[in-house]
Image (tube, rainbow, N blue to C red):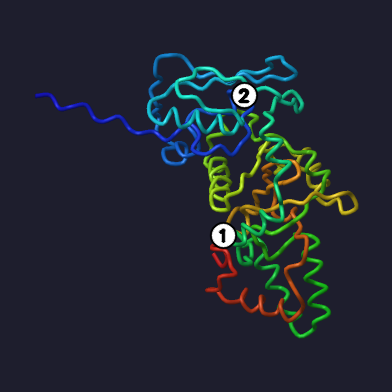
Amino acid sequence: AAAPPPPKPSYPPRLNSVVLAIKNTDEVGQFGGAYANVMPHVAMRPAIEKGGPIVFRLFVDGECVSVVEVSRVENHFEKAVEWICDAYGITYVAGKSSYDVRGCTLVGDVPLAPSYFAALRDFDAEAFLKKMSDEGFVTAARLCKCLHLLVLSLVSLYDDDVALMAAFKALERVHGSVFRQNGVLCTIPLALFEMRRSVYGERAKLWRDATTLDLALVAEISAATGLKIPVLEFATVTPSVDLDRAAALATAAWDVEGPRLKVVPLRGDADWGGRSLLYVPVHGVLLRCYTRWARPETSFIRDATHLKELLGDAVDRGSSLLSSGSYS
C-alpha cells in the first residue's frame, strides 16, 4: 500500500503577537514573526482556504479610507483574527467575514484605529521602567567591544582622579554611554528623531531576521510586564548607503543645544554592532538607532572610585562587564 501523505505542518499564526499598529494589508504581513524566525529559509507557505479573506474597513469621518484583508489560511487562523480585532479595539465574532473600524485618525495619509491612541494616552513610562526592572529586562552594565580599547586607555590616569574623570567625560561626549544598559531612561535629539524613516520602505524588510527579533522582543516584554506597549510606527535613524543622509544624521545626533526626547533602550547594551532598539513612549515609535546617540538621563558612573572598579573589570578577560567580542 502506498505510504500515507506526510502530515501538514502546523504553522504559527499570521501574527503571533500584535505589537505593531495595523495600518494596511502590506504591514499586516503574511505569516507573523514566529514563522519568519523559525523557518526563515523554507520556501513553504500555508495553504489558502476557500471563502475569501476577512476584511477590515477603516473609517475616518464616516468614510472608508483603507481596507485590510486577511487571507484565510490553514491552522490558527481564527485566533489570528481574534488578535487583530483586539488590536483594533473591536469585538471578535466567530465566522464573521467583515469588520468596520470606525473613528480612525489619519496620521499623514495613514489611518490608525482609536485603540492605539487610547493605549498611547494611558501608557505610563515610569511604570513601564519599573516593570522592566522587576522582570529582569534592565541589564547590568556592559562594555561594548568597539569601545574596549578606548576605555583601557584610561588606565594610564588611574592615580589621578581629576584627570581620570575628565578623560572619561570627554569619552562619553563623543560616544554617549560607554557602559551600556537596557531598560534605562535615555534621550536623543528631537532633530534626529524627526529624520526617521520607516523600516517598511520595502515590504520584504519585514521578514528580515533582525526585524522579526525586534517585534518578538516587544511582545516578550509586553507579556512579562503585563503592559500593552503601543507601537504606532517602526522606524530607523541608522545610516544606509546614502552618504549625504549619513552625514545629516550624524550632524543631528550631535545637536547638544536643541530639545531632546526621552527613549528607553530595549536592546543594544552590547553585541549588537553598536546599534540599539529604542522605544519612544510619547510617540509610540520603535526606533533603530546607534547606541552612542542615545544618552542616559543620569550618569551610570557615580565617581572616580566607581570608575576604577569598572576599569579593573575591563582588564579582566573573564569579566561579565565585557561583551563576547572583546579581546577577540
Q: Secondary structure at mark 2?
A: loop
The image quarter containing residue 107 is top right
Residue farthest along the right direction in this orientation: 257
On screen, residue 108 versus residue 87, left or right, reads right
Q: In this rendered view, identify the residue nearer to me: 78 or 72.
A: 78
Q: Which residue is mark 2?
A: 24
Amino acid carrying mark 1 in the image: Glu
Q: In this rendered view, identify the residue nearer to me: 227 or 256.
A: 227
Horizontal and vertical percent for residue 324? 54, 63
On screen, residue 227 versus residue 153, left or right, reads left
Q: In this rendered view, identify the residue nearer to me: 326 or 223.
A: 223
Amino acid carrying mark 2 in the image: Asn
Q: Which residue is mark 1?
A: 135
Horizontal and vertical percent for residue 153? 71, 73
For the N terminus, the image quarter is top left
| Mark 2, other Cα within 10 Å: few <14 / some 14–19 / many ≥20 | some
Q: CA distance from mark 2 to mark 1?
A: 33 Å
Q: Nearer the viewer, mark 2 or mark 1?
A: 1
**Residue at 46% over, 41% down:** 37
Horizontal and vertical percent for residue 124? 71, 50
**Residue at 59% over, 25% down:** 26
Q: In this rendered view, identify the residue nearer to me: 8 or 290.
A: 8
